[in-house]
Image: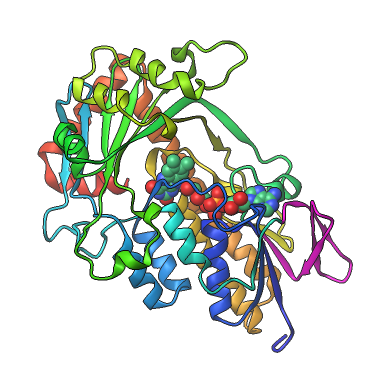
């Protein structure tokens, strides 16, 4: 099959789809990406993604080294540690990324905090002739000649040898390919917000939050996540290349608990934006004033609320010329912060498989089947891990909560347990 023109169609120009397109482009594989957004910057609110070692290796596999170096240089200041506290700010567990720790700021495993907009901008570079905006995918059709056609809402059709659904958690490609695959409600509702950083915010924010991700276990199954995004300002000309919106400095928080606790009207699934701050403050009665202040003084325009949903793991299916990547299959709760990293891992794996097919080293269906088997395994392991974490931090059972806190305190006192604890 060497020399045979081979064309890949990707639906969705998100984290995973663009990383795959970059990898294929760099190996001269014919690829086109179709994205429903009308422009590069539509709907791009900045939230921070923490790229871990898996994500970084995957980016390395698909992006030119110089671009990755720029992304590293533009990333926010890395965390100095991870802290677990109770709602009165009593320490349960603090893991320091001290110098020499693999996750220290210069360590080999350091996390790379990047704005979603900055990452997308970087992943779009050099793909102007490949990414087609304003193309909402509607359905695919497998043709007798062995090609796949993608149909879009504007009536246009694109044809290729393989179609990759990288169209996120509400994937239409998945709905057609795997109509029985489910995405279900977890019963948890989350509200998040940001407070723009300045000297007074820095002085009044609990110290742990300024050092890195801080996970706060409140009573009655209430949970708060908080972290700060700040940049080093001594990075030569990096700032010149970066859109100002990519370098917003802020403290972000996300409060979550069971939906019933919010006492919502029957016709609402999440608190209304205007009422969400008051709803959260009411549920934080008795919490430390520093945490209440963070929520009360956050900027109203940054408040969002959402139902936490998760995919239900499924077994491998008979492989076709249509496959999936990232949230389109294994969408997960945000409680481990690994959704984007897993989407990037898929992109790197699928890139390897499709390059081998394009070069004649593998046949398409066996290569896709091997990709799918591995991806279903690690992808749904990540889904289960994030769901376990969600249950752990929202448990309303006093015994279970007491047990969790005891585990944290034990790990706090025994440093050799801390590495395995973070990666469990
Ligand atoms: C607040 C928040 C914080 C997060 N933090 C982290 C973190 O720290 N670390 C981490 O690893 N993950 C994090 N995640 C999860 C992460 O953002 C997702 O898992 C990741 O973006 C999934 O990538 P993807 O490529 O599969 O999908 P997406 O990035 O969602 O991309 C899907 C793309 O498909 C397009 N699309 C959808 N439907 C269609 C259609 N019909 N036709 C054409 N195009 C379509 C969409 O417009 C979008 O561009 C976070 C998520 C949230 C909400």
**Quadrant occupied by the C terminus:** top left
- Secondary structure predominantly adopted by residues drawn in magenta: strand
Write the residue at 51% across / 49% down.
Answer: 44
Write the residue at 35% across / 19% down.
Answer: 221
* Closer to the camera in the image, 408 or 219: 219
Q: Is residue 18 left or right of residue 392?
A: right
Q: Residue furthest bottom?
A: 3
Report the coloring of the rendering.
rainbow
Give above or below for 56 relative to 180. below
What is the x, y in percent for residue 72? 32, 65
Residue 244: image quadrant is: bottom left
**Quadrant occupied by the N terminus:** bottom right
Q: Is residue 191 left or right of residue 370?
A: left
Say if the magenta span includes residue 144: yes
Say if the magenta span includes residue 348: no
What is the x, y in percent for residue 337? 39, 45
Magenta span of residues: 135-164
What is the x, y in percent for residue 362? 64, 78
What is the x, y in percent for residue 100? 12, 61
Residue 218: image quadrant is: top left
* Closer to the camera in the image, 394 or 167: 167
Give above or below for 415 relative to 390. below
């Amino acid at each position: 099959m060497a020399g045979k023109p081979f064309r890949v169609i990707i639906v969705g120009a998100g984290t995973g789809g663009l990383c795959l397109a970059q990898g294929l482009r760099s190996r001269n594989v014919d690829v086109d990406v179709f994205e429903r957004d009308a422009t590069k910057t539509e709907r791009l609110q900045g939230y921070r993604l923490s790229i871990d070692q898996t994500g970084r290796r995957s980016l390395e596999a698909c992006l030119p080294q110089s671009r990755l170096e720029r992304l590293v240089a533009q990333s926010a200041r890395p965390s100095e540690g991870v802290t677990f506290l109770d709602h009165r700010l009593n320490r349960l567990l603090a893991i320091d990324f001290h110098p020499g720790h693999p996750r220290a700021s210069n360590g080999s495993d350091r996390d790379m905090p990047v704005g979603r907009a900055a990452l997308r901008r970087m992943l779009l570079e050099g793909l102007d002739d490949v990414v087609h905006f304003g193309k909402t995918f509607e359905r695919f059709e497998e043709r007798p000649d062995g090609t796949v056609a993608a149909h879009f809402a504007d009536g246009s059709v694109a044809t290729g040898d393989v179609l990759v659904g990288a169209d996120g958690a509400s994937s239409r490609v998945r709905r057609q390919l795997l109509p029985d695959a489910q995405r279900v409600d977890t019963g948890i509702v989350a509200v998040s917000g940001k407070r723009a950083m300045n000297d007074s915010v820095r002085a009044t924010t609990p110290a742990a939050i300024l050092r890195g991700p801080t996970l706060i276990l409140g009573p009655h199954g209430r949970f708060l996540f908080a972290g700060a995004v700040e940049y080093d300002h001594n990075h030569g000309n990096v700032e010149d290349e970066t859109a100002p919106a990519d370098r917003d400095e802020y403290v972000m928080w996300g409060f979550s608990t069971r939906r019933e606790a919010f006492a919502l009207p029957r016709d609402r699934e999440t608190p209304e934006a205007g009422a969400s701050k008051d709803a959260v403050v009411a549920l934080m009665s008795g919490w430390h004033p520093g945490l209440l202040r963070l929520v009360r003084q956050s900027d109203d325009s940054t408040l969002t609320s959402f139902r936490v949903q998760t995919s239900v793991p499924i077994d491998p299916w008979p492989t076709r010329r249509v496959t999936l990547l990232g949230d389109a299959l294994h969408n997960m709760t945000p409680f481990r912060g690994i959704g984007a990293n897993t989407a990037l891992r898929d992109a790197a794996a699928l890139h390897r498989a499709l390059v081998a097919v394009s070069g004649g080293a593998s046949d398409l269906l066996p290569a896709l089947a091997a990709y799918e088997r591995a991806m279903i395994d690690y992808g749904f392991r990540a889904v289960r891990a994030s769901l376990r974490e969600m249950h752990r931090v929202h448990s309303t059972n006093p015994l279970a909560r007491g047990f969790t806190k005891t585990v944290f305190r034990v790990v706090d006192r025994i440093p050799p347990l801390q590495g395995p604890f973070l990666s469990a």
